[in-house]
Amino acid sequence: MPNVGIIGLSRSGKSTVFSALTNIPYSFSSDTNKVGIVKVSDERLEYLRDLYKPLKYTPATFEFVDIKGSNSTVKGSLNSSLSSVREVDCLAIVIRGFVLDGLDTNYVDDLDNLLLELILSDYSQLERRLERLEKKLKAKENGAFEEKLLIEKLLLRYAEGLIYRVEELDSKEQEIICNFNLLSLKKMICILNISEQEISSIETSSKYLELKDKCEKLGFPLLYIAANIELEINSLEKEEEKAYFMESYNLVSLASSKVIKEAFKCLGLKTYFTAGTPEVRAWIFKEGYKAPDCAGIIHSDFKNGFIRAETLSFKDLLTYKTPQLARSNGKYRLEGKEYLVEDGDIMLFRFNV
Ligand SMILES: Nc1nc2c(ncn2[C@@H]2O[C@H](COP(=O)(O)OP(=O)(O)OP(=O)(O)O)[C@@H](O)[C@H]2O)c(=O)[nH]1
Ligand SMILES: [Mg+2]
């Protein structure tokens, strides 16, 4: 299951955002990581459910982690939690966009300060790595020199307090860097947590535009959410009430779906479906997966004994309305081992055991 770690400066609203995203009640305590699992809402899956009326309905799931921080200093919220940051697939950086104890914030400074913490950690990790590399260099070990060059290149940039993006490195460098597991190289999404009063005016505020500009330069998607309002919406029981509330705040979709959507994009994730009367289910896979790789997500036997995949794209199903009509119009394809699975494919795997 893919996951997103929520980080941010102390009291930026991380736990409130986590609660809004996961529907798990807010708790102030931040001594341990909190994990919440969210069902990925997908209109296509709902369509399949209405069509097949299955016994079991299984949306894909996504994990959010409220990463514990140290509250000893106003800044420096990550000191005690860097190992947790290392473990997640993607980072959601929460920036405080509301006034707290009468104090306003500068969004860009806050983002810079947080990134600096990640960079500092990476810097010392790379320095240690460089020391350990000495022996290998003396022994002229394969690849040691290339590694040294790359580390020096990274250190130079980090010394300026700036991050690297994976895309800036060539494929050989990317291969080497995989083993480093650097924090500042992770995929990141920026979440500005604003108060309800600002929802209507945020997009034209100069502070927001400044942050947007910064995020564009860094290649981070930027979302703004009013976590407190989302908490209230979550607490409502009736769907109509939720819809009414959302409309009154001009909210098109809930924060969790916005963040999940960005995380899918960042991590290159896609969805395929399996559909029948026993179960309608969504499966998350990585861009570039071939049919046997996707089969392997269900069970390794499906991959090892893969023969072919009967495939219908969701778009074709929508056009022809029923699987029968799609079939009689030749829209079911038999795909083999080399087939690159596409987002929205409805698949049935044939395999030998
Ligand atoms: N006005 C307003 N206050 C908020 C919002 N989100 C959080 N707060 C308040 O800000 C304070 C900190 O929120 P938390 O969600 O606990 O922040 P945090 O980043 O998890 O804090 P630590 O884990 O202690 O670093 C709390 O008093 C919240 O009630 C918001 O959207 N609007
Ligand atoms: Mg917290």
Image: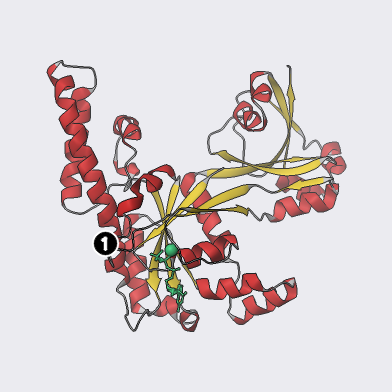
Residue under the point 59% across and 62% down: 24
| Residue at the spot of label 1 | 113
Left or right placement of residue 214 versus residue 20 in this view:
left
Mark 1: which amino acid?
Answer: Asn
Residue under the point 26% across and 44% down: 122
Residue under the point 34% across and 59% down: 70
Is residue 212 visible in the rendered structure shown here? Answer: yes
Q: Secondary structure at mark 1?
A: helix
Q: Position of residue 178 (x, y in %)?
A: 35, 34
Left or right placement of residue 31 versus residue 163 in this view:
right
Residue under the point 60% across and 67% down: 253
Ligand 1 closer than 8 Å to the CB at disc 1? no
* Relative height, residue 276 to residue 51 (above, below): above
Residue in front for this viewpoint, 223 or 331: 223
Residue in front for this viewpoint, 88 or 201: 88
* Relative height, residue 26 to residue 197 (above, below): above
Is residue 255 visible in the rendered structure shown here? Answer: no
- Placement of the C terminus among the 4 image quadrants: top right
Figure quadrant of residue 8: bottom left
- Placement of the N terminus among the 4 image quadrants: top right
Q: Position of residue 344 (x, y in %)?
A: 66, 44
* Relative height, residue 49 to residue 247 (above, below): above
Left or right placement of residue 57 versus residue 28 in this view:
right
| Image quarter where ligand 1 lies | bottom left
Q: Position of residue 33 (x, y in %)?
A: 46, 53
Q: How many numbered dots are placed on residues in this image?
A: 1
* Relative height, residue 330 to residue 29 (above, below): above
Crowd rating for badge 1 (residues with CA inside 10 Å; few <14, some 14–19, many 20+): some
In the rendered image, the residue lying farthest to the left is 138
